[in-house]
């Protein structure tokens, strides 16, 4: 199983057990694009 | 005078640039943007006990290298924001080569001790070579995760490796100590790349990553993993490429594709990798014997802050790595 597939499986399985690491990440999967706007302030390569 | 004014003054006084007005004009416009990635040598310089002013030639070198990389990257990506639209592709290519050379000149003309200057020159040259290889691999559009990370390590990490390494060298660090900061640069470069991929895939209107059929991390996840919306996602991907070819933007397809990215866990995967890199970088930093590590610690905290804010806005505590330990709470 690929790393991505393994992540996907655990994300939607472990979150059901309220695992402290997985539940918050699963919560992100229910967010909207606008709710994710906080990520915009992360430093990237920019453009100019 | 702020550091950007100092570095502009430093570069404009190098003889290499004085005979090329277009190069001077582009440099002035780039410096005016005050791109924070140009500042990366400063915390590394300070961490080894150097003064900010000592890092100016390293900032200048890193800035010139970034100009060179972006000029080429925009050409390769047919980026609508690219400088080549204004000056033409031949001029953009020639200026890219010139700025790469100016990057090395910035170190060669500094008053750095010869062994440190040579190590910095090697570092910058190595970065230019690896970045070119990374761009070449990226142009072949990595189709699986292993290829994606290989491209990220070639294309993105070397820049931060050179930034921390040259900053430490110009700050007077012994060669072995400066060498240790390279590993931190590798991980920090990956952190920036993951943010870049998240920003590009969530941007409106559609970023070239969508319209050119590229595979940044979240898109790669959504088209690789078996999830209920996979077939629809692949259909939307094709529609977005086609809409760009036809010059008819399809905002509805973009909205739906971005919603699937979130729903299938692709954005969560990116955030997971940001947190992993943050954890690794923190561990690396703890192991390096630095006299003043606060600025580098602050740099890492700044990169993880958006994720902290995101979880806070959703009313979630965030994964364990984000929570202070008992020892930290006691401090």
Image: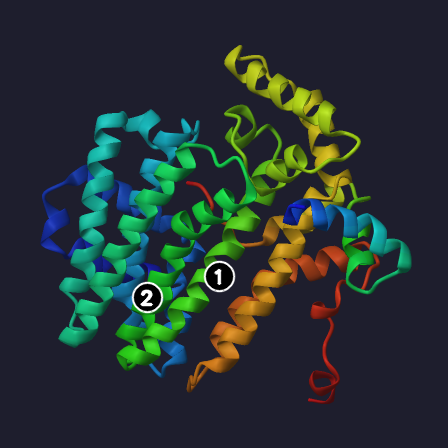
Residue occupying the point 78% across, 52% down? A10
- Between B286 and B21, which is closer to the camera in this rendering? B286
Farthest-out residue, right: A17
Q: Which residue sits at x=82%, y=44%?
A: A30
Say if A5 sits above or below B292 in the image. above
Residue B265, by quadrant, is: top right
The total number of labels drawn is 2
Evaluate if marks 1 and 2 touch, with contact meaning CB atoms under 8 Å apart.
no
Q: Which residue is tagged 1?
A: B188
Percent x, y for residue B63?
Answer: 32, 54
Give the x, y percent position of residue B95.
22, 38
In the image, taking residue B148 as reference, residue B290 lies left or right, namely left
> Mark 2 sits on what residue?
B1
| In the image, farthest residue toward the bottom | B330
Chain letter of the residue beneath label 2 in the structure image:
B
B158 vs A3, left or right, is: left
Q: Of circles 1 and 2, which is in front?
A: 1
- Secondary structure of the residue carrying tag 1 is helix
Residue A11 pos. (x, y %)? 78, 51
Q: Quadrant of the N terminus of chain B?
A: bottom left
Task: Tell me which residue sits at (40%, 33%) in the image.
Answer: B139
Q: Is residue A32 visible?
A: yes
């Amino acid at each position: 199983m690929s790393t991505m597939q393994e992540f996907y499986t655990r994300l939607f399985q472990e979150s059901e057990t309220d695992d402290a690491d997985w539940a918050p990440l699963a919560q992100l999967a229910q967010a909207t694009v606008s709710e994710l706007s906080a990520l915009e302030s992360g430093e990237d390569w920019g453009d100019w | 005078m702020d550091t950007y004014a100092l570095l502009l003054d430093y570069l404009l006084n190098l003889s290499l640039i004085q005979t090329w007005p277009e190069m001077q004009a582009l440099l002035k416009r780039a410096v005016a943007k005050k791109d924070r990635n140009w500042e990366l040598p400063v915390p590394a310089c300070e961490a080894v006990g150097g003064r900010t002013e000592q890092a100016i030639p390293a900032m200048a070198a890193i800035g010139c290298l970034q100009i060179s990389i972006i000029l080429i990257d925009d050409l390769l990506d047919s980026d609508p924001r690219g400088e080549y639209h204004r000056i033409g592709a031949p001029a953009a290519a020639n200026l890219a080569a010139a700025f790469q050379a100016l990057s090395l000149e910035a170190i060669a003309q500094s008053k750095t001790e010869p062994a440190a200057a040579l190590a910095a020159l090697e570092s910058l040259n190595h970065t230019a070579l690896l970045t070119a290889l990374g761009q070449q691999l990226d142009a072949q559009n990595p189709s699986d995760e292993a290829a994606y990370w290989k491209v990220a390590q070639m294309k993105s990490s070397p820049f931060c490796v050179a930034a921390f390494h040259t900053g430490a060298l110009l700050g007077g660090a012994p060669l072995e100590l400066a060498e240790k900061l390279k590993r931190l640069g590798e991980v920090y470069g990956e952190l920036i790349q993951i943010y870049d991929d998240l920003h590009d895939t969530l941007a409106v209107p559609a970023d070239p990553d969508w319209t050119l059929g590229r595979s940044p991390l979240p898109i790669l996840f959504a088209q690789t993993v078996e999830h209920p919306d996979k077939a629809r996602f692949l259909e939307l991907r094709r529609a977005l490429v086609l809409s760009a070819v036809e010059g008819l933007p399809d905002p509805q397809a973009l909205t739906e594709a971005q919603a699937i990215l979130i729903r299938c866990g692709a954005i969560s995967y990116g955030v997971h990798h940001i947190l992993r890199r943050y954890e690794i970088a923190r561990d690396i930093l703890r192991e390096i014997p630095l006299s003043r590590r606060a600025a580098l610690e602050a740099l890492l905290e700044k990169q993880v802050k958006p994720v902290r804010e995101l979880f806070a806005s959703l009313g979630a505590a965030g994964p364990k790595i984000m929570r202070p330990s008992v020892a930290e709470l006691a401090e």
